[in-house]
Image (cartoon, coloured by chain):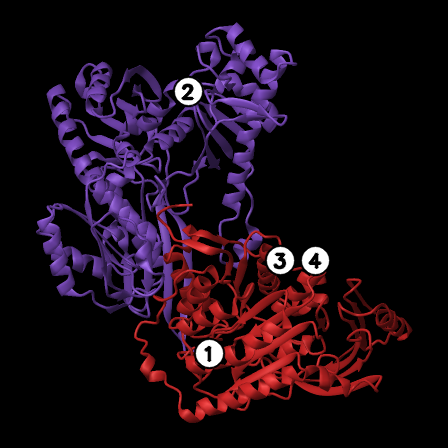
Amino acid sequence: MIIGIDVGGTHADGVLLEGGEVVKKNKVNVNQTNLQDGIVTLLESLIPEPKDCLSEIHLSTTLCTNAVVNEEFEKVGMFIQAGPGVNPDFFSCGEYLYLLDGIIDHRGKALQQPSNDLLKSWTKELKEQNISSIAIATKFSHRNNSHEILIRDQLNSTFRFISMGHQLSGVPNFPRRVYTSWLNSALMSTFAQFKTSMDKSLQEMGIDCPCYILKADGGTIPFDHGCNFPSQSIHSGPSASVMGALALYENIGDALLLDIGGTTTDIAIFADGTPLLEPYGATVNDRPTLVRALQSKSIGMGGDSCVIFDNNTFVIGPDKKGPPMALGGQVPTPTDAMIVLGTVETGSKEKAAEAMLLLCPQLDPTVTARQLLQSFVVGIQNAASEMVEEIFSRPVYTVSELLTREKIQPKQIIAIGGPAKALQPVISDCFAMNCIVPKDFEVANAIGAARARITAQASLYADTNLGSISIPEVSCHEGIPSSFTMLAAETRLAQEISLLAEEMGMQEAPAIDIIEREEMNTIRGFSTTGKIISLKGQIRPGLRTFEEVI
Amino acid sequence: MSLYMPKAANKVGLVLFPAFDWCISPSHPEREERLLYTRDQLIEEGLEDFDNIFFFNPELAKAIDINRVHFCVPSPEELMTDSHFISTGGAIRAAKAVMENEVDKAFAMVRPPGHHAMQTVFGDRGFCVINIEAIMVEYIRRHYGIKKIAIVDTDCHHGDGTQDIFYNDPDTLFISMHQDGRTLYPGTGFLDESGGPSAQGYTINLPLPPQTSEEGFDMVMDRVILPILDEFQPELIINSAGQDNHYTDPITNMNFTAQGYAQLNKKLNPDICVLEGGYSIEGALPYTNLGIILAMAGLDTSHVREPGYKSENFKQSQKMNQDIENLCAQALSIFQNRQNTKKGFFDKNSVVKRKQIFYDTTGFQVSETRIYHLCKECPGYTEIIAEGLSQHIYGFSVPFNSCKRCQSKARDKYTKTRPSHDTLTVLQDRPADIFEKK
């Protein structure tokens, strides 16, 4: 049996699953400044008898998200080696930012070492300031990690928490690498404290099963791995809801997921039953990062958003000004419209009708209510088509990709969240598609957390002319023979990803998807000098099967 | 939008299409690998996340866009691969982004290039089949009503194709700076090639000596190009942004730099850049392209330097400075005397020019005769007779700025021409956007 817990803004949901079935579910209030108390209370209510039936705990926590939202970061000594290119003076990583010299070029050639003297004097300064967290990012470290390692080796004995860009992601994008490694280090000590106190509580409860943390990409990592990669636990909430939808409804195919809340609606997209990922990573409180994340778009419209009627159109959100009028609030909301139409049964129906009259005094409240909900859904629809368009517009680099690319055409809609049931017919109508509201949708996130499996990804860059291979996520940068082939590269990458998954506790890694593949001959003068092979592979976000869960 | 990323002062659109699955031949300079390192550099710099920088995929050009400019023998479809339709479509996409105010400026980093493709096309010349800028220019005129356009060609090779296409058009100012044709393909681009009878002084060639460095390029910018642009007052400036003047380019002999290209684009301030040549794919293109983009965006370019570059290695001699100064003075006077030289043709009804065009990629020759029909009201229409690879074409080309009379004269003449089994007879009527053949 498995426990899934999703910590939200005000409360935490938890489920105990046996196979796909919910055996127990519960909800407790949480205090964001002391998450573990809420989590422990919830755990105590969910633990099965006997305790050893419990095989795993999966936790989606707001710990790091909160730290980010409140900008409560540990001070970080940030070492950046930018080399030639864009002037790095735009980086904003707090007061301890150090720009090192040294160059690694686009092919991963180390052309100039960073200055040792500078490193030494900066290390001294950081020591004096009692800084314990360090982040290191060099341009093109996904091609050659040697300078990040060299800098790390200089600092290793002196600082407790160190993040290196290449270990966090093998995806190119230097500014994102800088912000990701900075963010990771800024969260390490917070996460370590949380882990220590959770371990203690679990021990007191007599639980010794493995514990996993949900990541933004819909996968999990073991709790202790999380200590090295706390940044990956940011934005796990939306990923819990996506995985929840996947668990609650089979045959998703090409679909839109709408998670309709009080103040926002989150939209995600499934293609052929798999949730789509952001091309680079999550944007974390305005910082672009390489934190692998499911793609979701949040719009400022929810059941409790305030509504005004202006210039013959309803303007919904993005502000929330208290509860719906039917529940004692001051301004009309979409929830009031649902109450007028009888699709939500709570609060005062009279007050709700008043809200509609406030918007359109001449019209029958039910007519206004219908029109209002329709504009609400049209708003969601516009955002969804923008999202589909954005995905379609992602850059492609080959003739065949350009000629064969196709726009995703969602065929159904899964709606979850408080107002989902009430909006179901309007959504069906506006989108002219089947809209499904799965059962147990109120605990979808906790179920999603429980059913998520380990994900792993890695990238490979082999240059047979230079005779080197780089698999940054596993800190591999070594020699290869000039005869190295695409097949060898694919095999190697799949092996590394399986190993990563095994290290994290996955008994048998599922098939590895190779999701990007580039092969190019290098030619100098008029002869072929080698080839460059570039690959990206992953264990895609997906559900564990029931056999695995039991 | 992000406080954590740079914000470009100008909105810039980038059409980055490296066509990783297309080459002329596997070891040709125009091969799959050409923009690999450029793509890698631009993506690693995170330009996709910069505020006010936008990436667009190319669209596919249509035959009508090609036929508005070229006479393709036997047809565009026979001569072009998908990749040509895409690179042309990339230039068109960049132009659309600017003309429809999606962005302030745009750069089409596409391949294959186009500036050696002339009006008549029988095959591949100098890595080019069709002239992607020229097609873009006429697309802009057709769809957005723009008249006066300046094209500044900063490729190391003379932009002989673009020159050929706009040679008799006084509304297109064509300036090419390049390595002296006596020392480099295509062997043309001298001062005296200065425009057709109706556009004398609107083609300006600046043949620079081998080893010209930043100093020399600065001189031609400051002394010739900027003053001429100032006087011509174009509605749009286009940079044919070839990057093979770079000191590491394997097929040329110049000493220009990434900094140089960035500074040049700051001064030139083009609305649209279209990539042309540039074959130092590792040592130059990642830096020159980045430099051009940052310059267009109004961002700091000072850190864009080739690893290992030392400016003291690239000082020009006194003699070279003197030569370039002279060149500048002569070029400027050609433009300044443009009205006077035009008068010389007024008493004639037509002017006949003949030329031989060599197609280097597969090695064959085309003979071409061009009859410029002169008119006091407009640049006049052109008759073109060309023959190569045992194929013949007889074409009538009516420029976009033609008067009604010349337009109907050309049509009459086309109508009266009897179709012949071995000759493609064609009417290209740009004002009416008509392309007919028989």
Q: CA distance from mark 2 to mark 4?
A: 52 Å
Q: B36 or A363, which is in the foreground?
A: A363
Residue drawn at (50%, 88%) of the image: B325
Residue B71 place in picture, x, y as percent? 73, 72
| Residue neighbourhood size for the residue with mark 3, other residues' Cα within 10 Å, grouped as few (<14), some (14–19), many (≥20) | many
Q: Which mark is residue B379?
A: none
Q: Which mark is residue B218?
A: 1
A470 sits to left or right of A37: right
Letter of the chain that mark 4 sits on in the rendering:
B
Letter of the chain that mark 2 sits on in the rendering:
A
Q: Secondary structure at mark 3?
A: loop
User: Which amino acid type corresponds to the residue marked 3 in the rendered image?
Assistant: Leu
Residue bearing mark 4: B143
Chain identifier for the purple-coloured part of the image: A
Q: CA distance from mark 1 to mark 4?
A: 35 Å
Same subunit under labels 2 and 4? no
Quick one: which residue is furthest to the bottom in this view? B319
Q: Is residue A526 visible?
A: yes
Residue A132 place in picture, x, y as percent? 13, 45
Q: CA distance from mark 2 to mark 1?
A: 67 Å
Q: CA distance from mark 3 to mark 1?
A: 37 Å
Residue B322 place in picture, x, y as percent? 47, 91
User: Which amino acid type corresponds to the residue marked 4 in the rendered image?
Assistant: His
